[in-house]
Amino acid sequence: MAKKIRPDRIAKGVAKATKSLISGSSKFTKDRLLECQKPCEHLSNGICVLCNCVVKAKSEVFEEYCPANIWKDIKILEKAGLALAIKNPDLATISVNEETNRFTLDYGKYKWKTKDENGKEVDTDTNLKLVVVNDRGNFFTENQDLTEIKLAASCSCTISSKPKKTLKEGDYLEFDIKYEARKAGVFSKKAHFLAKETAFFITLKGEVI
């Protein structure tokens, strides 16, 4: 993989890493660094030998990913040159399968109903906040920008988004998706991200109890 230099991300990472010395790092940064310190065979004196990045600074930038895919909140699909991140990983885990061009979001087991602060019974929050990052410049020399973007999901799934028609290389797109339970039991639902240049699929799975 040829690492593309992105000055804006480098500057953002250095600035946040410097600021964190005073105010502390965000939760996602702390979680990423914990994964790197388990230990990781690719970490050498604070540098990732796969991408030659300073891990402390890189982990501060939400749209950056681990090339070994060990960070729990973001995964890279190299075949598409796209990464998918989840802003609320407490609701679901994320994994990726290169062979099937698919990301899987797993809610695990959760209760259909819960109670709000007033004691009223409500549906459990299943709204996942996702980010698609276009990193095609790391993998392709042509067709790096994405055009004619469409997002769609199967029944019982809702996508809340005003998708950009194009997604420039190095840029990102945010959208929400949630599973709306209609009965208890195991479920597996599909969604897809389509562009003229590439596509990937999403599986939402879990068990409502």
Image: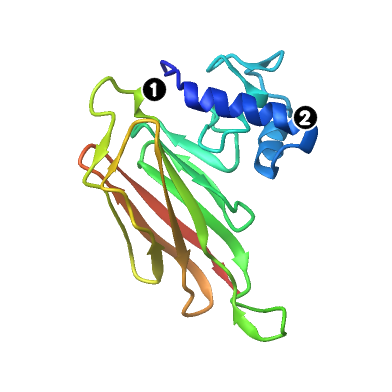
Q: Residue at x 73, y 27 (%)?
A: 37
In the picture shown, does residue 168 fall above or below 56? below
In the picture shown, does residue 152 fall above or below 55? below
Specify the farthest residue to the right.
22
Q: How is the image coloured?
A: rainbow
Residue topped by disc 1: 138
Q: Depth check: give the residue in front, 164 or 159.
A: 164
Q: Residues under labels 2 and 1: Cα distance? A: 30 Å
Q: Depth check: give the residue in front, 144 or 92.
A: 144
Crowding at dot 1, Cα within 10 Å, few <14 / some 14-19 / many 20+, comes out as some
In the picture shown, does residue 18 fall above or below 115? above
Measured as percent of width and height from the top left, residue 71 is found at: 60, 36
Measured as percent of width and height from the top left, residue 128 is found at: 51, 58
The quarter of the image holding the N terminus is top left
Measured as percent of width and height from the top left, residue 85 is found at: 50, 44
Q: Residue at x 39, y 62 (%)?
A: 159
Measured as percent of width and height from the top left, residue 8 is found at: 49, 26
Crowding at dot 2, Cα within 10 Å, few <14 / some 14-19 / many 20+, comes out as few
- Label ID, residue 21: 2
Q: Residue at x 72, y 85 (%)?
A: 119
SS class of the residue under badge 1?
helix
